[in-house]
Image (cartoon, grey):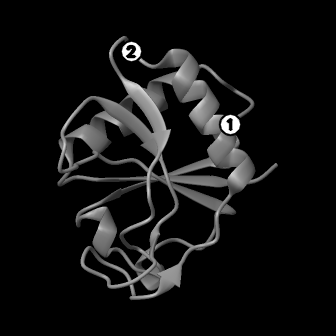
Amino acid sequence: MQTTLLISSRKDPAGSLIHEELCKLLEKDDFATPFIRHLHASERLIYLDGPSLPNDADRIIFLSRHASERPRPVLTVHVTGNFGTADYGGEPGTLTAAATNLMHALLNRLFIHAPEGYEVMYEATHHGPTSL
C-alpha cells in the first residue's frame, strides 16, 4: 500500500479545515490510517520546497484554498509546477510528476460529494512547489 502525505498550511484557514475534516473521516478507516502521514506547515504551501518536505511518502496531497480572477465555489484537483514563469513559487519551467490515477479518483469523488452549487474541475498547473 502506498503512503500518502497530507499537507496543509497554518496560514490557510480553508486548507486547515479541509485537513481537519479529512482527519475525522480517516479516523473511521482503520485500513487507511497507517498509510497516511500529516504535515501542518507554517509557511504557504506554494513556497515549500523538496528539502523542507518529509521524504517518507509515495505521494503528496496539498490541501489548500482556491483563488481565481473569477471567484466562485469550486473544488479542484491539479499538479503543482510551472509551465513558464514561477510567479507563485517553485522553479520556472518545472513540472511535478502527476499521480493521474489518484487525481482521477479524487475528481470523481469530489463530483459525487460536492455540495450543491459547487463546480468540480481540473485546475491548470501554475504554482509551486516544484522540487518534489
Residue holding disc 1: 105
Q: Tell me, for residue 121, which label it has, or none.
A: none
Direction right: furthest residue: 1
2 relative to 82, above or below: above
Report the disc number at residue 115. 2
Residue nearer the viewer, 2 or 113: 113
Is residue 10 at least partly visible in the picture?
yes
Q: Position of residue 105 (x, y in %)?
A: 68, 37
Asked whether the viewer can see residue 131, the reply is no
Question: What residue sits 22% from the left and 48% below the top?
Answer: 67
Would residue 74 appear left or right of 93 to someone viewing this image? Answer: left
Three-letter code, disc 2: Pro
Q: Residue 120, how many percent across, how many down?
A: 46, 31
Q: 57 or 30: nearer the eye?
A: 57
Judge whether 101 appears above or below 117 on screen. below
Q: Secondary structure at mark 2?
A: loop
Q: Residues within 10 Å of mark 2 (few under 14, many from 20)?
A: few
Residue at 17% over, 54% down: 11
* Residue at 31% over, 68% down: 46
Which one is earlier in the sequence, the residue at label 2 or at label 1?
1
In the image as oriented, which residue stretches furthest toward the top?
116
On the image, the x and y values in percent for residue 112 come to: 57, 17
**Neighbourhood count class around disc 1 (C-alpha, 10 Å): few under 14, some 14–19, many 20 upward:** few
Query: Which amino acid type is shown beneath numbered disc 1?
Result: Ala
113 horizontally vs 41: left or right: right
Q: Total number of numbered labels?
A: 2
